[in-house]
Every structure is written in structure tokens, then in C-alpha cells.
């Protein structure tokens, strides 16, 4: 890739981050921290590659570029100090936004001078093939360039080449460690959320590209490893729910059966009681009727007996009277 084209692409990337920061709300602390982390990484790598390769080549091959190259290095120095302060500053701090604003103004001024004054001179003097070769070398240099600002480190060859490479390795080790830590925390949060049946938290890794990539990879790997455990937990949960449902169904059926039996027994008892009452009533009525009939019969018998006795008495009296009369008449006749 053409070296100047690559540097301009870097400028565009950073400008997009600047605009996103400027549009972020006053309380968008998480978004602002993420944007500043990306700005720090992009500018640190960009500045290192320019200082290690582009500026030395330009000064060695293009006339009258020493002043602008040295001025650019000084502007880098100011930017690095701002970046180093922002690197550890809380986005809620009173001067955080103000410091980012100053950073943006300095970088935009720097970019304007490079693209309007410096780059045209280099392109005019350096051939297309040379710029392509320089671009390829800068792409390789980016792979080991520092991802953090180091304002106290050398910014010109040969010191910056040696120190920059060492700093780049150290930065990437730190970025990797940060990514592992962030990814592990996210994975634990995911597991807890699943166990508690809550949505997995939306977390955005912070830091450099290496840190963010590592964090996502660790989180993804841990989540995949935990999926088996989570599925086992869910399966056990489903089995337990099935057992509970079966027990509930059995209990409901038993309850319904007992209720039906009790209802049937109640209805049977009611029918029996009604039948008993009806039978008793019938028996009582029958007894009453029978007693009535017996009393009537007894009454009739008594009347008949009375009449018979009266008739017998009458007959006896008549007989006795006749006998007495006969006796008297006989006695009279004897005298």
C-alpha cells in the first residue's frame, strides 16, 4: 500500500472517532471511555510509525522537509502527553472532556499541515514504487508498534526503533493480559446471568484493539466451554420441573378422586337418609292405619258384646219373672 494513502486512512479513522466523541451525550461515560481508548491506540501506533519510518525517509530524500518534520515530531510529543493523561483519567473527571477537546484541536491542526504541506512534497519527490515499498514496511511496523503513548521515549532513530519495538511488545503483553481479565469477568457474568435466568449483560471491552479482541475471544471461548454446563443445568431444571408437574398431576387426580368419592358418599348418605325417612314415614302411617282398624274392630266387638249381654239379661229377667209368676199361681191354687 502507498505510504501516504495509508497515513491518510489513519487520519480518517481518527477523525471518525473524534466526531463520535463530539456527538456523545454529556453522561455517555462508557461510550466516551471506549472512544478515547481507541483514539489512544490509533494515534500511538500512527505516531510511532511516522517517527520510525516516514519522517526519517522524508528528511533523507526530500529537500526542505526538516523543519516541518521536526515540528510534526513536537506536535506528536504534545499529543502523547495528552494521551498519557487521558489513558488513566476517569471519564467523569471534570477536565476529561476539556482535555479530549484540546487533543482533537491539536491533532486536526497537525493533520491539516501534513496533508496540505508535508505529504504533497513527499509524493512529488518520492516515486510510486518507493512509496509502495515504504507503505509495506510501515504496515509491518504497525504490527509491533506501541499501543500506548510513551512521551518520555526517544522519538527519532535509532533510539525510537529499539525502544519503540520493546515498548510495542510490552504494550501488547499488557493489552493481552487486560483482554484476558476482561473476557474472564464477562464469561463469569454470562454464566451467572444464565443460572439466574437473566439476559446476558451487554459489555464492551475497553482498551486497545488487542485487548478488545482478546477479551471477546476469551469470553467466547469460556461461554462455549460453559454451554455444556449450562445445558446440563437447564436439563436438570427441566427434569425437575417434569417431576414436579407429574407429582402435581397425581396429586390433582387424587384430590379429584377423593372429592368424587366424598361427593358420591354424601349423595348416597342423602339418598339413604331420604329412603329411611320415607320408610319410617310409611311404617308410621301403616301402624297408624292398623291401630285405627284394630280400635274400630274392638269398638264394634264391644258394642256387639254389650248388645248380646243386654239381650241375655232381658231374656233371663223375663224367664225369672215367668217362673216366679208360675210359682205364685201354684201356691195360690193350693190354698
Image (cartoon, rainbow, N blue to C red):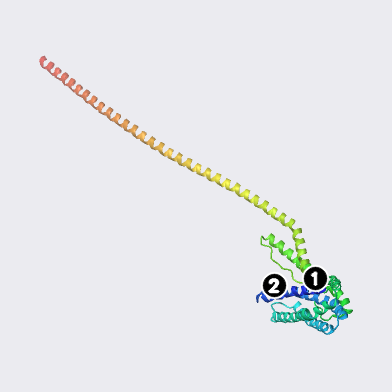
Can I make out residue 329 in this image? Answer: yes
| Front-lying residue, 9 or 239 | 9
Q: Is residue 103 above or below residue 276?
A: below
What is the quadrant of the C terminus in the image?
top left
Q: Position of residue 237 (x, y in %)?
A: 68, 54
Question: Image quarter for residue 209?
Answer: bottom right
In this rendering, position of residue 321 left or right of residue 97: left
What is the quadrant of the N terminus in the image?
bottom right
Residue 31, labelled with which disc?
A: 2
Query: Which mark sits nearer the N-terminus, 1 or 2?
Result: 2
Mark 2: few, some, or many residues within 10 Å (few <14, many ≥20)? some
Mark 1: few, some, or many residues within 10 Å (few <14, many ≥20)? many
Residue that sits furthest to the top in the current view: 334
Can I make out residue 37 in this image? Answer: no
User: Distance of mark 1 from mark 2, alpha carbons?
Assistant: 19 Å
Q: Secondary structure at mark 1?
A: helix
Residue at the spot x=44%, y=40% of the render? 273
Question: Image quarter for residue 55?
Answer: bottom right
Counting the numbered discs, the total is 2
In this rendering, position of residue 221 left or right of residue 245: right
| Front-lying residue, 155 or 212 | 155
Residue linked to disc 1: 175
Question: Image quarter for residue 292?
Answer: top left
| Front-lying residue, 298 or 235 | 235
Q: Position of residue 177 (x, y in %)?
A: 80, 69
| Front-lying residue, 293 or 188 | 188
Q: Mark 1, mark 2: which one is toward the viewer?
A: 2
Residue 133, labelled with which disc?
A: none
Residue at the spot x=74%, y=74% of the render? 12
Q: Is residue 318 above or below residue 17?
A: above
Q: Secondary structure at mark 2?
A: helix
In this rendering, position of residue 226 left or right of residue 290: right
Amino acid at each position: 500500500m502507498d505510504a501516504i494513502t495509508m497515513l491518510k486512512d489513519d487520519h480518517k479513522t481518527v477523525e471518525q472517532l473524534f466526531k463520535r466523541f463530539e456527538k456523545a451525550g454529556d453522561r455517555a461515560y462508557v461510550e466516551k471511555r471506549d472512544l478515547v481508548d481507541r483514539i489512544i491506540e490509533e494515534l500511538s501506533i500512527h505516531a510511532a510509525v511516522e517517527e520510525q519510518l516516514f519522517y526519517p525517509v522524508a528528511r533523507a530524500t526530500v529537500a526542505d522537509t526538516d523543519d516541518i518534520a521536526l515540528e510534526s515530531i513536537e506536535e506528536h510529543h504534545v499529543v502523547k502527553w495528552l494521551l498519557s493523561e487521558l489513558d488513566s483519567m476517569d471519564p467523569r473527571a471534570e477536565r476529561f472532556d476539556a482535555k479530549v477537546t484540546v487533543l482533537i484541536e491539536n491533532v486536526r491542526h497537525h493533520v491539516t499541515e501534513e496533508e496540505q504541506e508535508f505529504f504533497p512534497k513527499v509524493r512529488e519527490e518520492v516515486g510510486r514504487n518507493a512509496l509502495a515499498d515504504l507503505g509495506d514496511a510501515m504496515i509491518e511496523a504497525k504490527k509491533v508498534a506501541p499501543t500506548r503513548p510513551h512521551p518520555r521515549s526517544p522519538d527519532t532513530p535509532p533510539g525510537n526503533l529499539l525502544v519503540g519495538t520493546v515498548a510495542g511488545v510490552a504494550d501488547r503483553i499488557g493489552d493481552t493480559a487486560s483482554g484476558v481479565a476482561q473476557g474472564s469477568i464477562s464469561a463469569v457474568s454470562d454464566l451467572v446471568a444464565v443460572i439466574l435466568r437473566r439476559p446476558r449483560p451487554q459489555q464492551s471491552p475497553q482498551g486497545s484493539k488487542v485487548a478488545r479482541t482478546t477479551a471477546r475471544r476469551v469470553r467466547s471461548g469460556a461461554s462455549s466451554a460453559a454451554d455444556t454446563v449450562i445445558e446440563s443445568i437447564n436439563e436438570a431444571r427441566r427434569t425437575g420441573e417434569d417431576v414436579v408437574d407429574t407429582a402435581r398431576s397425581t396429586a390433582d387426580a387424587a384430590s379429584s378422586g377423593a372429592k368424587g368419592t366424598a361427593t358420591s358418599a354424601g349423595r348416597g348418605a342423602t339418598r339413604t337418609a331420604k329412603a329411611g325417612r320415607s320408610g319410617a314415614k310409611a311404617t308410621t302411617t301403616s301402624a297408624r292405619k292398623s291401630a285405627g282398624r284394630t280400635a274400630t274392630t274392638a269398638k264394634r266387638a264391644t258394642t256387639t258384646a254389650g248388645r248380646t249381654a243386654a239381650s241375655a239379661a232381658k231374656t233371663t229377667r223375663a224367664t225369672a219373672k215367668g217362673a216366679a209368676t208360675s210359682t205364685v199361681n201354684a201356691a195360690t191354687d193350693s190354698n
